[in-house]
Amino acid sequence: MLIGVPKEIKTLEHRVGLVPSSVKEFTIRGHEVLVETGAGTAINFADKDYQEAGATIAASAEEVFEKAEMIVKVKEPQPGECKMLREDQILFTYLHLAADKPQAEALMESGCIAIAYETVTGRDGRGLPLLEPMSEIAGRLSVMVGATNLQKHNGGTGRLISGVPGVKPANVLVIGGGVAGFHAAQMATGLGANVIILERSNDRMRYLDDYFHGRANIVYSNMDTLEKAAQQADLIIGAVLVPGASAPKLISKAMLKDLIPGTVMVDIAIDQGGCFETSKATTHDKPTYVVDNVVHYCVANMPGAVPLTSALALNHSVLPYALALADKGWQQALQDIPGFRPGLNVCKGEVTHEAVAESLDLPFNGDPKALAA
């Protein structure tokens, strides 16, 4: 199979779909890899590194999309890239379609087979193995960017997240105790903050309580506990995920008036529409905005701030699935690997993930035999 790796074009996105070591895994199996010139230079992978791994360098994205049977990316295809996709071409990348109907419709129109990293599930049907590495990074980054924006000149309350002897540390509220929320709480407790994690799964609450052992307060999440905790927080981190679906809006605009002026809210769920009513996607060059004296950080590709770490971590998780697609073809790979089938979001003009279809009010086709035909 001929695999194509275009350069990412989303604002300040420096990750790359395949690093040279991953390319080598494809070429030693007899596959061809076509990499757009400069695709990895921002994270110190030169065209020469790709050539030494067996890749051919393409002069343009147009050449990559025209020739490749499978496109491997990081971020969702931008409108110009969607126009270059073609019927029966495999697209393997993050899509986050639940908050992006125009992209879903463009993928449908192309006739491609679009497989989303974020909806591939674990072998037992639980967990999201291709989303987890980025959730880990986003969770850790959320505390770092939150602490920075708490500084007064950035609009925050002016409280040092760790405090100092005789002065209390910041109160950090983490909404959601999944992978991103866990790593956010881990960073915040490590810095000495007072941390509350809101969670609804009893099993997960027991795990978190066991792990943090009093270093974070684990509280059952309902509207009452959320409102009270938010009113006392200096930093609020939204880390709620419903796989494939739009994120629930947990903090309303009306609630902002009761928050401490200068509170910082970091919305990790912004790729899925955000879990704050006032959230709107931002970019790394303009990451924040203020609503009712509350600082909002809603960067839609947070891990892109540390693209070298992110690209390597993502490749480690994605590579076995991408190799299976190349070795077996998409129908057989989705059938053979437990948990891979939910990754199929759009296929030959049909939406094939139920939560995506429901979020976008589009028809759903879940018949794998009809899709394969």
Image (cartoon, grey):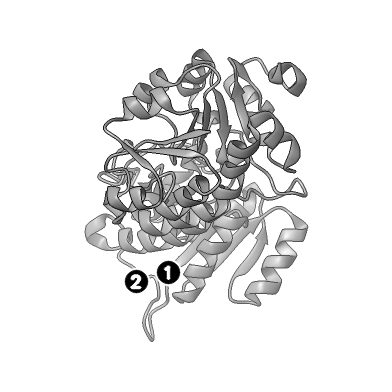
Res. 279 image quadrant = top left
Nearer to the camera, 49 or 352? 49
Q: Which residue is mark 2?
A: 160
Badge 1 crowding class, 10 Å Cα cut-off, few under 14, some 14 to 19, many 20 or more, is: many
Q: Residue at x 45, y 28 (%)?
A: 68
Does residue 352 sit above or below 333 in this rendering?
above
Residue 280 location in percent, x, y? 40, 36
Q: Which residue is mark 1?
A: 170
Contact check, label 1 and label 2, Cβ < 8 Å: yes
Residue 320 visible, this orientation: yes
Amino acid carrying mark 2 in the image: Leu
Residue reaching furthest to the left: 153
Sequence-wise first label, 1 or 2: 2
Q: Nearer the viewer, residue 242 or 368?
A: 368
Q: Residue at x 65, y 23 (%)?
A: 358
Residue 187, image x and y in percent?
48, 69
